[in-house]
Image: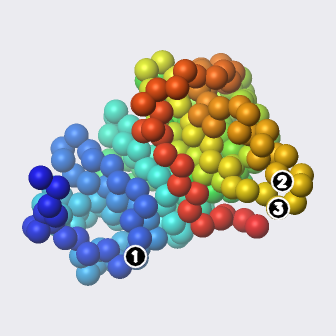
Amino acid sequence: DGTPDAGFDPGANAAILSLAVQPDGKVLAGGTFTQIAGQPRGRLARLHADGTLDGFDPGVDDRVETLVVQPDGKVLIGGRFTRVAGQARNRIARLNADGTLDAGFRPLVDYGVASLAVQPDGKVLLVGQFTRVGGQVRPYIARLDADGTLDAGFDPAANGFTGVHCAEWPGDLLLNLAKEPFPGKEGQREQARHREIATTLRTVPEGARRRPARRAADAAVRADPGPPDRP
């Protein structure tokens, strides 16, 4: 009926920015917190279905903005961190189900990752404030192969980002690009140009862009900029 579940109260000491439920009912939480249920947990934690804390404790040095549970039980995380489980990981990492780091998954991303999605073929879509992935120019959106290497054939060449969240849709991915106003006449022209095209873009597997038909389902993809990652 929408009333709060009084028995579920983990008590994080700062913001929770992303949640995911595992098939076994456990709940993964990412954010800016450093404690949950009175215990230290660096920006990433896992809870039992009743809200009590699980032993999962990788330790992340900065905010976790997005997380996804893969079909194989591994956990993808994205955000503004540079270290996970004591190891260097730039803004994206993959964890094994027990919380240990997946040593073979090491993409290099130059700025924050705001949202992630896993395709049925195992490839990983990421969007954020970055402009380079794996040493290659990829403004604001990129796709990785399942092993973390850059998918060289996928390059939609987005030209701006303030807030993007991605969600799977049958056969492709919907993106909602929310543009903040830019100052001055040039900024007004840029904003007007973006209003002329659809703010919701459908990214097909090849990375091409086309205007989708308007549908109520587009509302499921919400923009949420959050604090800027860089000036």
Q: Disc 2 vs disc 3: Cβ atoms closer than 8 Å?
A: yes
> For the residue labelled by badge 2, is the local secondary structure a helix, a strand or a loop?
helix
Camera-side residue of 184 and 3: 184
Camera-side residue of 96 and 22: 22
Residue named by callout 3: 183
Residue named by callout 2: 187
For the residue marked with disc 1, what is the amino acid?
A: Ala
Q: CA distance from mark 1 to mark 2?
A: 35 Å
In percent of width and height, residue 93 lies at 52, 51
Q: Nearer the viewer, mark 1 or mark 2?
A: 2
Of the numbered discs 1 and 2, the one sitting upstream in the chain is 1
Q: Which mark is residue 175?
A: none
For the residue marked with disc 3, what is the amino acid?
A: Pro
Quadrant for residue 205, please give it: top right
> For the residue labelled by badge 3, is the local secondary structure a helix, a strand or a loop?
loop
Residue named by callout 1: 14
Residue 131, placed above or below residue 194 = below
Q: Disc 3 vs disc 1: Cβ atoms closer than 8 Å?
A: no
Point out the image quarter for the C terminus. bottom right
Q: Nearer the viewer, mark 3 or mark 1?
A: 3
In percent of width and height, residue 211 lies at 64, 23
In percent of width and height, residue 35 lies at 34, 77
Of the numbered discs 3 and 1, the one sitting upstream in the chain is 1
